[in-house]
Amino acid sequence: MRFCTLASGSKANATLVEVGATRLLIDCGLGPRILAKRLAEAGVSPSSIEAVVVTHEHIDHMKGLAQAVAKWGWPVVSTAGTLAGLRDVPVGWRMPLPYGTAMTIGECVVELVAVPHDATEPAAVVVTSSRSGARIGVATDLGHVPEALGAAFER
């Protein structure tokens, strides 16, 4: 399992997670040109990304999303509330994932956990390797750590 922060902060957020041959992007706050450059620096082609998981609809987490989806054909995984706020992403590319439900994408099992934030159904992301059981949790923009998040990350 490999984890690589491509951008983190109030202007842009994007994180690469690799599990075996499966590559996921968590959030897409960078435009396609800069995102492709940062992925290349990590040795990854944008076309090898299998899906992008969006934690919430704030601009620093989805600024380049619609352009990236159009360019590379990535499906977008998120809560129904967040997906509703991604107006520029075509409906056919949206994959709703309710809190507490697992979705398998390649060698990754993805789960979303509710977090406190001023967005519609914001989430932290837990990715588990279907082969090894290794796990990584990604949580951003938290005012505090809710008990359910700590429990989800500890499993």
Image (cartoon, rainbow, N blue to C red):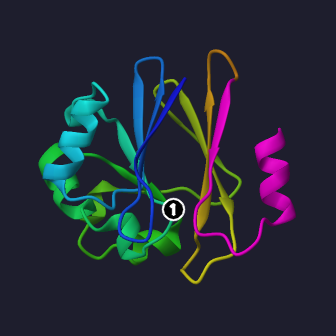
Q: Position of residue 137 (x, y in %)?
A: 65, 44
Q: Position of residue 43 (x, y in %)?
A: 27, 24
Dot 1 corresponds to which residue?
55
User: In the image, what residue occupies the spot 58% across and 84% down?
Assistant: 118
Q: Is residue 74 magenta?
A: no
Q: Is residue 71 above or below residue 1?
A: below
User: In the image, what residue occupies the spot 53% across and 64% down?
Assistant: 79
Q: Position of residue 145 (x, y in %)?
A: 78, 65
Q: Is residue 112 above or below residue 19?
A: below
Q: Is residue 100 above or below residue 129?
A: below
User: Which one is in front, 94 or 10?
Assistant: 10
In the rendered structure, the answer to whether residue 30 lies left or right of residue 140 reads left
Q: Position of residue 61 (x, y in %)?
A: 40, 65
User: Which one is in front, 126 or 2?
Assistant: 2
Q: Quadrant of the C terminus?
A: top right
User: In the image, what residue occupies the spot 66% across and 70% down?
Assistant: 142
Q: Quadrant of the N terminus?
A: top right
Q: In terms of image quadrants, where is residue 59?
A: bottom left
Q: Dot 1, crowdedness within 10 Å: few (<14), some or many (≥20)?
A: many
Residue bounds of the magenta highlight: 134-155
Q: In terms of image quadrants, where is residue 50?
A: top left
What secondary structure is marked by label 1? loop
Q: Is residue 88 above or below residue 71?
A: below
User: In the image, what residue occupies the spot 38% across and 69% down?
Assistant: 60
Three-letter code for the amino acid on which mark 1 is drawn = Thr
Q: Is residue 150 magenta?
A: yes
